[in-house]
């Protein structure tokens, strides 16, 4: 039986560059699937919008054996559905 060293923690502003790179890789993956959505999430976006009293989202990370593996992003955005004339 093998042991896996895993840590789940809240991501911090110091993780911005890694999260920005992961977001870029995810965009490339989505483009490969044919998704053409304008995707603008960078390290700077994370720093600007992910902290403070009205943070737009919260990020958790799962680190396996000291390497980033999974990022979970939970948004606090309000979605309005069915507003029409």
Image (tube, rainbow, N blue to C red):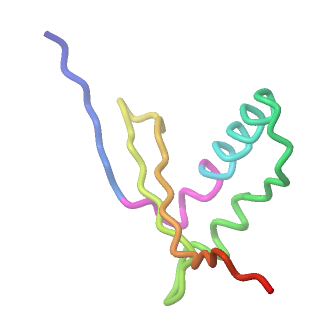
Task: Give the prevailing secondary structure in the magenta stretch.
Answer: helix
The residue lying furthest to the top in this view is: 1
Q: Position of residue 61 (x, y in %)?
A: 42, 49
The residue lying furthest to the left in this view is: 1
Residue drawn where x is 79% and y is 58% of the image: 40
Q: Which span is picked out in magenta?
A: 10-18
The residue lying furthest to the front in this view is: 85
- Does the magenta-highlighted stretch encompass residue 17? yes
Residue 25 vs 38, above or below: the answer is: above
Residue 65 vs 19, above or below: the answer is: above
- Does the magenta-highlighted stretch encompass residue 7? no
- Locate residue 72 relative to residue 24 in the image: left or right: left
Residue drawn where x is 49% and y is 47% of the image: 71
- Residue 62 versus residue 75: which sits nearer the camera? 75
How many marks are shown on the rendered structure? 0
- Locate residue 22 relative to residue 37 in the image: left or right: left
Residue drawn where x is 57% and y is 72% of the image: 50
Which image quarter holds the N terminus?
top left
Residue 37 vs 13, above or below: the answer is: above
Residue drawn where x is 63% and y is 78% of the image: 80
Q: Position of residue 65 (x, y in %)?
A: 35, 30
Residue 71 vs 74, above or below: the answer is: above
Q: Position of residue 81 (x, y in %)?
A: 63, 74
Which image quarter holds the C terminus?
bottom right
Q: Position of residue 16 (x, y in %)?
A: 61, 59
- Residue 9 versus residue 81: which sits nearer the camera? 81
């Amino acid at each position: 039986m093998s042991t896996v060293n895993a840590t789940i923690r809240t991501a911090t502003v110091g993780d911005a560059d890694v999260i920005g790179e992961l977001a870029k890789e995810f965009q490339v993956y989505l483009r490969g699937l044919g998704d053409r959505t304008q995707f603008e999430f960078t390290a700077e976006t994370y720093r600007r919008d992910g902290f403070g009293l009205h943070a737009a989202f919260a990020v958790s990370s799962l680190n396996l054996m000291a390497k980033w593996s999974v990022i979970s992003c939970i948004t606090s955005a309000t979605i309005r559905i069915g507003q029409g004339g």
